[in-house]
Amino acid sequence: MTMLLYTSALLVLATLLQASVLPIPQLSPEPVVAIHEPLLELKRVKAKSGLNVITSCDQPNTLAITFDDGPFEYTAELLDLLDRENVKATFFMNGKNIGDITKFEDVVKRAFDSGHHIASHTWDHKDLSQMNEGQVRWEMTRLDDTFMRILGVRPLYMRPPFGYLNDAAGHYLASNGYKVVTWTIDTNDWRHPRDIQASMKFYRAQLSSANANRRGFIALQHDTKADTVRHLVPAVIKYARQQGFEMVTVGACLGDPQSNWYRS
Ligand SMILES: [Zn+2]
């Protein structure tokens, strides 16, 4: 009888344990976005247009940390940090996105004068894969002209918003000498802006000495996120140095001299 009771108790316990580990449906904190394969689509556009698409660094043991969607209110703070750490980075800037470039002209100039690589992320961060060539031209030249006014140069490196291009955009960018930069590490910091460890895991996976394919990396995050600037970037700098990586601009990690980064 005691044995029976004991067995029944065990069964009840096992059932309870099983119930407690059943998956609980998770609600996404971010709007659910459709799963795209921007890099695969880019490959196709590249093959058709002859576009120069850069996804990683040529120089071994280099890490190009890149920031999209600024300038914004945390960009100056990021520049302070990069100065203190003596790290050069790359900024894919918008004209009008979360911020307005005309309100941050001194920040843009300061980043450029400090030797950071300034590149285009289009005027207002629209999806270029939905545009015709004339619309793509407008997106690029409106921002190029603004950079020309602020910096005296027009960037030749660009990153399409969301990584999306169509053939018209590919043709326009290729025939106007733009170099398209994607990424090897996407931190997805916008999906979990307060959880820097979730972003760090992408760095750890690639930069770790356990990764047999260690080489030069281009990493994507956003200077529009306070925690990225204040917590993720210091953690990345520390980790990359521990792993023996040199943090340089996209131009430098390709061995491309600074005179090729811009035109007037
Ligand atoms: Zn963006």
Image (spheres, grey):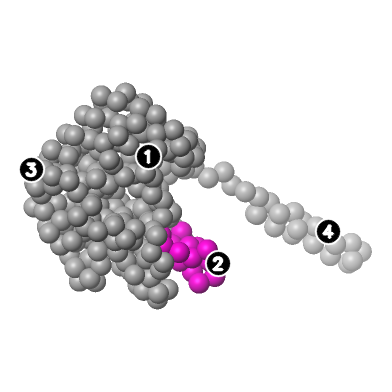
The residue tagged 4 is: 8
Q: Amino acid at mark 3?
A: Arg
Number of disc labels: 4
Question: Dot 4: what SS?
Answer: helix
Depth-wise, is mark 2 or mark 4 nearer the camera?
Answer: 2
The residue tagged 2 is: 212
The residue tagged 1 is: 51
Q: Residues within 10 Å of mark 3 (few under 14, many from 20)?
A: few
In the rendered image, the quadrant that contains the N terminus is bottom right
Q: Please report whichever mark, 2 or 3, sits nearer to the chain's N-terminal start.
A: 3
Q: Nearer the viewer, residue 97 or 159?
A: 159
Confirm whether residue 264 shows in the render.
yes
Question: Dot 3: what SS?
Answer: helix
User: Which residue corresponds to the image point at 39% horizontal and 29% vertical from the top-left?
Assistant: 167
Q: Please report whichever mark, 3 or 4, sits nearer to the chain's N-terminal start.
A: 4
User: Which residue corresponds to the image point at 85% horizontal and 62% vertical from the top-left?
Assistant: 7
Contact check, label 2 and label 3, Cβ < 8 Å:
no
Q: Nearer the viewer, residue 174 or 187?
A: 174
- Give the alpha-carbon distance from disc 3 to disc 4, as whole Å: 80 Å
Label 4 beta carbon less than 8 Å to ligand 1: no
The residue tagged 3 is: 149
- Give the alpha-carbon distance from disc 2 to disc 3, as whole Å: 45 Å
Q: Amino acid at mark 2?
A: Ala
- Residue 223 placed where, x, y %? 26, 53
- Give the alpha-carbon distance from disc 1 to disc 4, as whole Å: 69 Å
Question: Dot 1: what SS?
Answer: loop
Q: Which residues are magenta?
A: 202-217
Q: Please report whichever mark, 2 or 4, sits nearer to the chain's N-terminal start.
A: 4
Q: Residues within 10 Å of mark 4 (few under 14, many from 20)?
A: few
Q: Quadrant of residue 5?
A: bottom right
